[in-house]
Structures are given as C-alpha cells and as structure tokens.
Amino acid sequence: MFLSKYISEVFGGVKSLLTGMRRTGYYFTHHKNIITQQYPNQKPVLAERFRGEVVMTHDENNEHACTGCTACELACPNGTIKIVTKFDITPEGKKKKAIDTFVYHLELCTMCNLCVDACPTGAITMSNSFEHSVFDRSELTKVLNKPGSKIREGVE
Amino acid sequence: MEFSLASIADSIDQWLNAHCASWLALTIEFVIVGVLCIGLFAVLGLVLIMMERKVSAYMQLRLGPNRVGPKGMFQTVADTLKLLVKEGLTPAGADKFLFNLAPFVVMIASMLVLAPIAFAKDFVIWDVNIGVLYVSAVSSIGVIGILMAGWASNNKYSLLGAMRSGAQIVSYELSAGLSILTIVIFSQDMSISSIINSQQDGWWIFKGHIPVIISFVIFIIAVTAETNRAPFDLAEAESELTAGFHTEYSGMKFALFFLAEYVNIFIVCAIGATLYLGGWMPLHIGNWEAFNHIMDYIPSSVWFLGKTFFLIFVIMWFRWTFPRLRIDQLLNLEWKYLLPISMFNLLLATLVAIQGWYF
Amino acid sequence: MLSVNAYSIIFYLLAAFIIGNGVLAMTTRKIFRAAIFLLFSLIGVAGLYFWMHVEFVAAVQVIVYVGGIVVLIIFSIFLTQQTGKDMPRPTNTRMIFSALAAILGAALTYSLIRQYGFIGGSGDQFNVSPQRIGDQMLDYQDTGYALPFEVISILLLAAMIGCIVIALKSKPQES
C-alpha cells in the first residue's frame, strides 16, 4: 500500500542517516586512533611495497649482481635507465661484458617497477626513500653502481 | 550585583542618559550596538570556522589545524589576514555594480536577522512583536544576494550555482516556516521574548512531545538546506560547479560570503535553540523548585550560547557524515517528504494544542 | 520637537529611496538591474511599514515580494535572458503611449490630491498585535474577514491546480 510504503521509507531513511551519524560520532569521541602522521616530526610508516626510487643492492664486499644485460634499459618505457658497458678481462684471459656506469634519471622515472621485474639477476630493487627534492635538476641523474664495485662471483 | 548582560546594558544606558542629551545617548547606543554586532560577526567567523575544521578533523580521524598557535587556535586569524591582503578581483565581463554589491547584501541580510534574537535574559536588540515571522522574512533577502552574485559574475558555473541555490532556498523556506508555526501554535505568540517565557516550566521539545519533535527534525533539515550547507551545498558543489555562485570572488569579497555562511548557521541555530530549547531559559522541570533554583545559578547567556553551539555541532555533524544530494533528490525530499509531513504535523500540533495534551 | 523631526526625516529618506530605486528600475537598460532596483524599492516600502509600526504587514511585504515575487522574476530572467546584454531601446510608438499613460496617471493623482488634500494623522500609533490580525482574519461576524480570506485561498488553490495541470507531463501512449 502507498501510505505504509511511504511511512516505512521515511523511517528507513531516518534510520540509515542515524547509522551514519553513529559512525562519525564514534570517530569523534574516540580520538585516540588518529591516523594522521605528522610527517616532518614523525617518520611516516610506509608500506613495504612502496616505490620510492630504483636502487642497486650492494653487499658488504661492494659487489652487486648486475651483469649489464640492459634488460632493464629495454623494459623502461621512458628511457630512464642508461647502461654503459665495458669489457673486463677475466683471469682466464677471456673478455667479459660488465657495467661501467648504471645511469638512472630519477626525474624521468614513473616508479612503474618494470625494470625490477625485467632484471634476471635481481640486481635492482625499489627503495622506500621518498625525500627526493633537490635544488638542481642535474642532481637527480644518479649513478647506481658504487665506485669500485664489481660483479659478484658466480652471477652470470 | 549578579552578573548579567542585561544589567551591564542598563547601567551603560543610565550612565549615558545622565551625562548627555537623550538624542545623543540614543545615537551613541546605536553606534555601540552596531559595533557589537560587527564584532560578534568577526568573532563568530573565527570561532565557527575553527570549530568546523576541528570537528571535521576529529570525525575523519585527522588532527586538523595544529601549527599556528597552541593546537592551531590562531589558524583562522592567519587565514583572515591572508584574505584581507589579497586582491579583490572583478572580472572584466562582470556587471561591476551588482558584483560588488552582492556580498554586502548577503551580509546585511544576516545582520538584520540578528535584531530579534535574545542573547540573554532581557538582552535583545529589538524585541519586535512578530519575532519569528520577521526572522523568516528577512532571511529570505539573503537569497537575492546569492542570485545577484551568480548573475553578475557572468560565468556559467556561478549562474548555475545561483539558480540551484534559489530553487533550494525558496522550497525549503516553506517547511522551515511550517515547523516554526508549530511552536507559534503552542506558545500562542510570535515574539521571541514571549516564546521564551512560555518555556518557563520546561522546553517545548519536552513539553510538546511528538509534534514538536517532528517539527524540530524538519526544522533542522530545512535550515541546513537554507544555509546552503552540506549535504545540501549544491549551490557551491565544488565537484560540479567549481565553487558555485562565488567562483569569481576573491579576497575580502569572498570572505564576506564565507563569513555570512557561518553567521547564518549561528543565527538559524540560535532561532532553533530559542524555539525548541528555550533560548536563554535554564533547564526547568515543572515545579521542582530546588532543581530549578540550582539551574538558575548558571548565567542565561551561557545557557543560550551552550544550546546554540550544541545545534551548530549537530549541523556540522550532518555535514561531515552525509554525502551531497543531487538536485532532483533535493527537491523530492522537500516537496514529497518534508512538506507533506510538516503539513500533517501542523494539524497534529493544532489538535494537541486544542485538546491540551501537552504539559 | 527633535524626535518628531527625526521621525519625518526617516520618512523622507525612505520615500526618496523608494522613488529613486523606482526611477532607476525604469531607466536602466540591463534587465537584471531593473529587477534588483525593483527589489530595493519594495524593501523600501517594507521599511515604510516598519516606520508606521505595522510590523506584520512589513514582514508579509518582505516575504511575499522579496522572497517570492522578485525571486520568481529573477528566475525567469535567468532562464530567458543572456547576461550582460543591454535591452533594445523601446520603439517610438510605445514611448509615446507609455508617456501618455504616465501623464494621465499623474494628472489623476494630482487632481485627487487637490480635491481632498492630505488629512493629518490622528497622532496615535497603530496598535496591531498579530493575535488581533489573526482573530480578525478568521472572524466570520460582520467585521471579520473570513469570507474574503477563504475566497482568496480558493482563487490561489485554483491557480495552483491550473499550474500543475499545465506542467503535467502527458504519459507516453502505450503501443
């Protein structure tokens, strides 16, 4: 019937509004579980998967896992990575391809994670750092392999 | 002497009349009242905006402003200073005269409504005998200012915002008026002072039970819509209309619109507190002499402000809970739900009043 | 005497405000401005009612004219006119006829005033409480206004039903 439907609609509406107000009222009175992180005073809690920038992991012997295969360079959609390779002479006297410099343009990077996925040896990862602001743009062009580092034994 | 605003006003009046001619005393009193009104507006703007930001923050589990001054208390002062020094732009295609006039019309309309509000016992600017009718009449001038702003800006968003606001205010004035009428039926008078005096032995929301509670709910919804606040803020729906009727305004002219919005909230909440919660009347229960006497120790101005700010808090609570309505939903709510219900409620209230079924 | 003087000064100020805004409403070429000046003129009339201490009539004037009629006028301007365009000049024939109508109206008013003159007020203020107005309005005795009140309400009801009938969408034919 029309009238009973109308009345039940009104009461249903009022009830749903009150439900919403109860929720916000609960939040208003329970001030302890605030989610604001006061950033400069307080280090923000970031998710593990947060993508801040691409880094190359080095172990304690200053060795990395990058073979210079340029898979990441090819995977990058906007030319962020530039790998300069050189030829090392192995103890056996053979020539072996290795990286000279791993150039990373942070200013072009969209943090899409494709390079990390493409890397066959797991040499590069995404780090959690996010404070990237600098005074000059050229500071954003980074060399990821540390000076004097070399490829880890056994990584092909 | 007991502290009360009325006694202060009386002693100033006596002192002035003793020291200067009566016309000069009257003029000085006019000036004092005007300055007090403007001062009240400025303070209200600062306090209410701060309150809104804190309430919204707490309801969304945030902190809100917390940098300027202790707990961010001076944030609104800083905002006001920023608005004061900003340039007030007038667009080239605008109707300059109306464009500059509109914020003042809105402001003056809300200033005029302040006149019959009783801030404390015997402390009222103009106790006009048509009290609540005056309020609902004068508050309708404000919509003209909004329409003016929307048209004069020469901007499609502004025009759309103004039209929405006009349709909204004209419709919701009906149910606001009808719910005010319910109280007029019970208290048998329209002047603010006699409505308050009729609540000597209990506030209307307790004495008038069902019809008054229904009309209170309708009143709160209707005034939320009339002051263009969320969930009824279609006039300035930022996701659709940039900023609605004040898209083109900047600097102090924008600040006047902003201020008028908050002052209007204060005014409608003060009217709601007066009609339903007894204005400055302390919480009295029937003939409990001892209890009533204890309640009388709290100054009447504190009662009035407490009730008003409670209602303001409820309206803010609405804003931070409910999503915005669409324009057709808005008009449906008014014409298909609020208006029929308030008309039926008016009949019910008349029946209850004639039969004497209230306390 | 000063209070009397202040009283009449306020009257002349209000009268000048009403007439000035009326003239502006007539002479402006922007239609929205004309509506706004008309509005100010009507507010001035409401002010005059306040000055006469008939607050109820003043409030009704504001509600009906400012809150209702002028808002509707502005709405129709919004829906039909373009912003910022001046209205076209009226044609000469129309100018002549409106001038004639204005002159005749002024002559009629002048002759009436000359014939009867202004009678000074009795001096005592109106004392109309809303209760008395309400009683009078619903009084069905000889002095009451219950009948005209009801007649007008039926007229308005008829107008409202007419509006609904005109605005009603005809249902699409089921085929």
Image: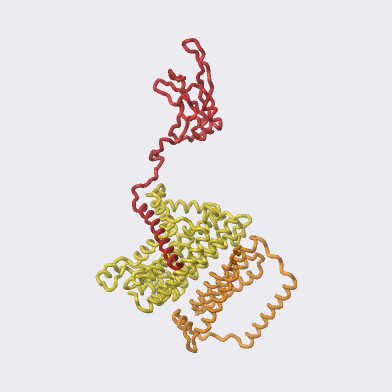
* Location of residue B120 with respect to A27 vertically, above or below: below
Quadrant hosting residue A17: bottom left
Which residue appears at 41% of the width and 41% of the height? A39
Which residue appears at 64% of the width and 63% of the height? C81
Residue A83 in percent (x, y) is at 53, 24
Q: Quadrant of the C terminus of chain C?
A: bottom right
Which residue appears at 55% of the width and 59% of the height? B161
Q: Is residue A57 visible?
A: yes
Q: Would residue B182 be found to the left or right of residue C31 on screen?
A: left
Q: Residue furthest front?
A: C175
Which residue appears at 57% of the width and 57% of the height? B158
Residue C16 in percent (x, y) is at 59, 73
**Closest to the observer, B281 or B277:** B277
Q: Residue furthest left?
A: B290
**Closest to the observer, B302 or B234:** B234
Q: Which chain is orange?
A: C
* Location of residue B62 with respect to B127 vertically, above or below: above
Residue B274 in percent (x, y) is at 39, 69
Q: Is residue B20 visible?
A: no
Chain A palette colour:
red
Residue C111 in percent (x, y) is at 66, 85
* Location of residue B160 with respect to B29 vertically, above or below: above
Q: Which chain is yellow?
A: B
Q: Residue furthest right?
A: C92
